[in-house]
């Protein structure tokens, strides 16, 4: 039996969908289904009958938007959002500024090979902190902040200088931001450095022939040409900032200055697993996801509008 031409052509047409199938299955299993379940839980509440004893005394009923109203008017969640806003104002500029600086330093001179080994060591030392798990790095920095065990405080004490209290006031934001910057700068640097390496070498040669210095090439040529990568890293950093959890949670046992609801995600974790209120926690998680989506969409829309204006 011979195979028809239409049947022979349908095989290659189905091939892309077969390649997409594993990714689509993982997306549905680990992203779409949890989001759908969180939406379902956010619209329900637990109703207790009588003393709450026996089977059937506790049952889930329809709650409408009551959980969302409670989440949006919760002062603890709003205070956590304000703390994360202050934390983000420190983390994002510092992380992206250092990532851009290190990427420009590694890409400063393409002509010589004398410092190849030094460049490789510098590249590895900048990226290596990203390979350390966030909880481990937060714990290590936490012990370095503690006056009783910190070698920095010991050195300052031996020198007769007062040690800073990094667990109070505005210093706490700097201490938390330092952990995030230390762990995330390498990843953002790699993204920006990859964009720098994609710029054709002829562009640099033309700039050198015109008499541009390294500083002028970096300021007028490299930074404008890696603007899409800067937007991408800003987008990643914004999402990570809104989801900050591991740094304050890890430092919390070391100090009383970090409450259990320091960030919105910590407040949701408390609602879900300490207070047992999964429905309010689900509503809070949906609110944070919606805010993240709106900010990301608005920022990308503004960036695309700016790029279209520049291309005209």
Image: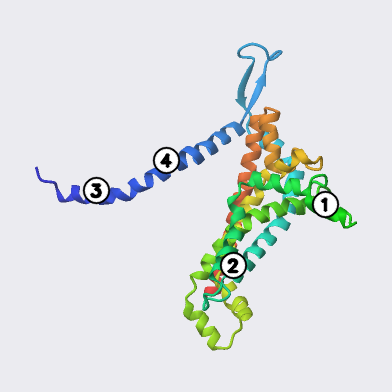
Q: Where residue 11 is drawn, which disc sits there?
A: 3
Between the C-alphas of marks 4 and 3, the distance is 21 Å
Among the two numbered marks 4 and 3 on one chain, the one whose residue lies closer to the N terminus: 3
Residue that mark 2 sits on: 103
Q: Which residue is mark 4?
A: 25
Disc marking residue 153? 1
Secondary structure of the residue carrying tag 1 is helix
From the viewer's perspective, is the residue at label 3 or at label 2 nearer? 2
Q: Is residue 123 left or right of residue 95?
A: left
Report, in whole angstroms, how far the alpha carbon at label 2 lies from the one at label 4: 37 Å
Q: Are marks 4 and 3 in contact (CB under 8 Å)?
A: no
For label 4, the SS is helix
| CA–CA distance in space, label 4 to label 1 | 52 Å
Is 283 or 97 nearer to us in this picture? 97
Asked if one can make out residue 222 in the rendered structure from this viewpoint, the answer is yes
Q: Is residue 303 visible?
A: no
Mark 4 vs mark 1, foreground winner is 1
Q: Earlier in the sequence, mark 4 or mark 1?
A: 4
Q: Are marks 3 and 1 in contact (CB under 8 Å)?
A: no
**Looking at the image, is mark 1 or mark 2 earlier in the sequence?**
2
**Residue 271: % across, % down:** 69, 32
């Amino acid at each position: 039996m011979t195979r028809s031409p239409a049947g022979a052509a349908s095989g290659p047409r189905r091939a892309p969908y077969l390649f997409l199938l594993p990714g689509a299955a993982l997306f549905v299993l680990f992203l779409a289904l949890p989001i759908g379940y969180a939406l379902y839980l956010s619209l329900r509440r637990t109703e207790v009958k009588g003393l709450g004893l026996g089977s059937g005394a506790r049952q889930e009923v329809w709650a409408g938007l009551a959980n969302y109203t409670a989440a949006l008017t919760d002062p603890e969640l709003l205070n956590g959002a304000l703390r994360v806003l202050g934390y983000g104002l420190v983390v994002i500029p510092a992380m992206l500024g250092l990532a851009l600086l290190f990427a420009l330093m590694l890409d400063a001179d393409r002509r010589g090979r004398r410092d190849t080994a030094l460049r490789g060591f510098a590249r590895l030392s900048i990226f290596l902190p990203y390979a350390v798990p966030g909880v481990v790095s937060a714990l290590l920095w936490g012990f370095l902040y503690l006056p009783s065990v910190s070698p920095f405080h010991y050195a300052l004490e031996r020198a007769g200088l007062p040690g800073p209290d990094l667990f109070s006031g505005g210093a706490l934001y700097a201490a938390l931001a330092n952990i995030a910057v230390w762990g995330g700068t390498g990843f953002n640097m790699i993204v920006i450095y990859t964009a720098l390496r994609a710029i054709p070498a002829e562009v640099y040669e033309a700039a050198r022939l015109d008499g541009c210095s390294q500083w002028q090439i970096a300021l007028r040529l490299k930074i404008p040409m890696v603007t899409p990568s800067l937007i991408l890293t800003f987008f990643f950093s914004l999402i990570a900032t809104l989801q900050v959890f591991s740094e304050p949670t890890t430092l919390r046992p070391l100090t009383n200055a970090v409450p259990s609801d320091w960030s919105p995600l910590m407040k949701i974790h408390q609602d879900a697993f300490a207070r047992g209120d999964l429905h309010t926690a689900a509503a809070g998680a949906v609110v944070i996801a919606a805010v993240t989506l709106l900010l990301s969409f608005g920022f990308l829309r503004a960036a695309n509008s700016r790029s279209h204006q520049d291309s005209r």
